[in-house]
Image (cartoon, rainbow, N blue to C red):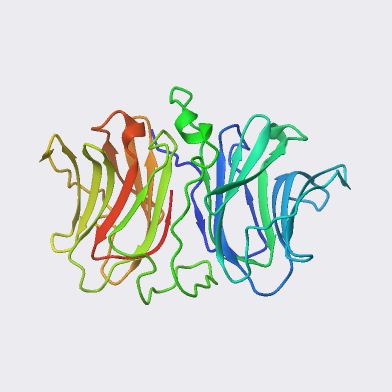
């Protein structure tokens, strides 16, 4: 049976940006938007819409930061071409010229919004979630990445992820210095945007539909680098491109010892190349991690650690330049 990936992350889309939400919006789904607020313009918005082919579509949730009057955020809904009652918060966590990350968690009764790792507001639903099938972003922003985290497996306890509002939204580690994504293609990397080694927590651990995205570049002289998904007792998944051996080694470090290596690659061969950019996408499934590189399915790695939620640390180290990490 052919494997169907959940909705893939979209990198550096042009603004205004609009995309269908595959399968519609569901309880437990999380939208993650990262980007930069432009110096020009006075507002931008994120809309969860009912349809995309007409200017007359309903809007279930309109999230609209405005930089006038000291800055505030408007939330609203539009139905039958009529806006409802505005909900305003006279506080703004965005700053012109600065990076941001918005996480919008869909719950059965409301949308929960966090900005840069901190809970910001909650907006109660005014129309059924089942009607929402489109995401739109417009205004004075450059977008770095837009992605959806799928709904969590109900067999997993969600309290550690969603029980504490702040813990539900771990902050993204933003790259330093000026950064102006301006095209849908990955630009050549001039210098590492993240420190190497890169280490960060995976709040709530792994769970089916959890995705991890790593965007970077391989130096021309690279020998090898690795991406590890760790837990307190070792490494659940070690992904190790080796350019001196022209392969990708996969393994786990359990009980103070490495297990048997997996080295076989599909007909596409070695998915990473020296001197080239890459987009690595790891999807946690109930039985395995599925790995995609530059839009192509590369391989699966069956779980050797079956308590997925204890896998709570991400590590990237070696001969690699990182441009963007999202999880």
- In the picture, residue 110 is in which quadrant? top right
Which residue is outermost to the bottom?
190
The correct choice, above or below, for 75 with respect to 24 in the image is: below
For this view, does 29 lie left or right of residue 124?
left
Q: Position of residue 62 (x, y in %)?
A: 74, 49
Quadrant assignment, res 198: bottom left
Q: At 37% across and 30% down in the image, what residue appears?
A: 286
Q: Residue 162 location, x and y as percent? A: 52, 34
Q: Position of residue 43 (x, y in %)?
A: 73, 64
Residue at x-position 14% and y-position 63%: 244
| Nearest the eye: 63 or 13 | 63
Side of 327 where 90 appears, left or right = right
**Which residue is drawn at the image coordinates 73% and 65% (left, top)?**
67
Q: Is residue 51 visible?
A: no
Depth check: give the residue in front, 260 or 65.
65
Q: What residue lies at 49% left-to-right and 75% top-to-bottom? A: 178
Do we see residue 306 in this rendering?
A: yes
């Amino acid at each position: 049976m052919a494997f169907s990936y959940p909705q893939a992350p979209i990198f550096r889309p042009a603004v205004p940006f609009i995309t269908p939400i595959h399968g519609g919006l569901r309880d437990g789904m999380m939208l993650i938007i990262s980007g930069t607020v432009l110096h020009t313009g006075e507002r931008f918005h994120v809309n969860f819409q009912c349809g995309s082919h007409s200017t007359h579509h309903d809007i279930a949730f309109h999230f609209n930061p405005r930089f006038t009057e000291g800055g505030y955020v408007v939330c609203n809904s539009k139905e039958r071409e009529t806006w409802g009652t505005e909900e305003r918060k006279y506080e703004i966590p965005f700053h012109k010229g600065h990076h941001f990350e918005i996480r919008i968690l869909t719950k059965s009764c409301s949308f929960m919004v966090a900005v840069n790792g901190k809970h910001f507001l909650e907006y109660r639903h005014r129309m059924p979630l089942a009607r929402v099938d489109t995401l739109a972003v417009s205004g004075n922003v450059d977008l770095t990445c837009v992605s959806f985290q799928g709904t969590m497996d109900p067999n997993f306890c969600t309290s550690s992820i969603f029980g504490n509002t702040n813990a539900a939204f771990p902050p993204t580690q933003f790259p330093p210095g000026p950064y102006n994504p301006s095209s849908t293609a990955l630009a050549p990397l001039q210098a590492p945007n993240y420190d190497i080694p890169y280490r960060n927590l995976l709040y709530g651990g792994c769970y089916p539909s959890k995705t991890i995205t790593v965007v970077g570049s391989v130096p021309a002289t690279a020998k090898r680098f690795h991406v590890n998904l760790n837990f307190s007792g070792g490494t659940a998944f070690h992904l190790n491109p080796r350019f001196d051996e022209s392969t990708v080694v996969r393994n786990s470090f359990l009980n103070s010892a490495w297990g048997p290596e997996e080295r076989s690659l599909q007909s596409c061969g070695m998915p990473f190349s020296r001197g080239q950019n890459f987009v690595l996408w790891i999807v946690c499934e109930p039985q395995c991690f599925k790995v995609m590189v530059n839009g192509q399915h590369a391989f699966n790695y069956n779980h050797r650690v079956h308590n997925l939620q204890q896998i709570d640390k991400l590590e990237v180290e070696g001969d690699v330049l990182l441009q963007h990490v999202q999880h």
